[in-house]
Image (spheres, rainbow, N blue to C red):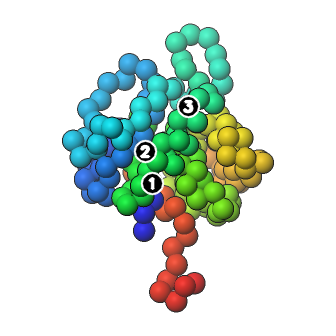
Amino acid sequence: MTGVVVSPLARIAEMAVRHGCREMVSLLAKGQDFHRPAVIDGTKHLTIGVNDISFAGPGNLVAPQETHVEQIVEFARQWDRARPLLVHCWMGVSRSPAAALIAALAVEPDQDDEALAMRLRVASPFATPNTRLVEIGDHALSRRGRLIAAVRAIGRGADADGNAPFLLPLRPETNTNGE
């Protein structure tokens, strides 16, 4: 089953190879340099310069904006889904899980937000999706508050050291009987 691989920066090459990813979304603060794994097609790599904050504030920090979410949605809709999409941030706990939810809803909009959020929690007890990205994504994808409520319902994830990548399935898994 295809899905979205969520990873910390330190493990993107390993996850790209392990899952056969060819497309990637990077959500890192501006100026955080890294090497794109060679298996990722350079033309299919979206880099978004954004900090892991949930408010607009003074200084050099960049809060998630509508344009960032629009980029994630557009990129996801161009993803061919033949292989998993790799999404990462610094620790793989906040920005990238939020982006994974947005990408999943962009390509499979008819799914239930609560079920999607529960799949996220099952896949990662550590994920705490960035609330600002979730709120903007909810609006951009016309979820009418359902995504926000679903993410609130799963609550904050457990404390993490940023070393726990996971695969978020796009749809619930079914057995061979179609259940």
The residue tagged with tag 2: helix, strand or loop? strand
Which is nearer the eye, 85 or 117?
Answer: 85
Q: Residue at x 60, y 53 (%)?
A: 105
For badge 2, the amino acid type reads Val
The residue that mark 1 highlights is 4
For badge 3, the amino acid type reads His
For marks 1 and 3, give the one nearer the viewer: 3
Quadrant where the C terminus lies? bottom right
Which is nearer the eye, 120 or 67?
Answer: 67
What crowding class fits label 3: few (fewer than 14 Cα within 10 Å), some (14-19), or many (20 or more)? Answer: some
* Residue 22 circle label: none
- In the rendering, at what x and y percent does residue 20 appear? 29, 57
Sooner in the amino-acid sequence: mark 1 or mark 3 = 1
The residue that mark 3 highlights is 68
Sooner in the amino-acid sequence: mark 3 or mark 2 = 3
Sooner in the amino-acid sequence: mark 2 or mark 1 = 1
Which is nearer the eye, 126 or 142?
Answer: 142
Quadrant where the N terminus lies? bottom left
The residue that mark 2 highlights is 87
Q: Are marks 2 and 1 in contact (CB under 8 Å)?
A: yes
Q: CA distance from mark 2 to mark 1?
A: 7 Å
Give the image quarter of residue 55. top right
Q: Residue at x 66, y 62 (%)?
A: 110
Q: Residue at x 62, y 46 (%)?
A: 156
What crowding class fits label 2: few (fewer than 14 Cα within 10 Å), some (14-19), or many (20 or more)? Answer: many
- In the rendering, at what x and y percent does residue 64 appear? 59, 28
- In the rendering, at what x and y percent does residue 25 appear? 42, 40
Residue at the extreme top of the image, as rendered: 59
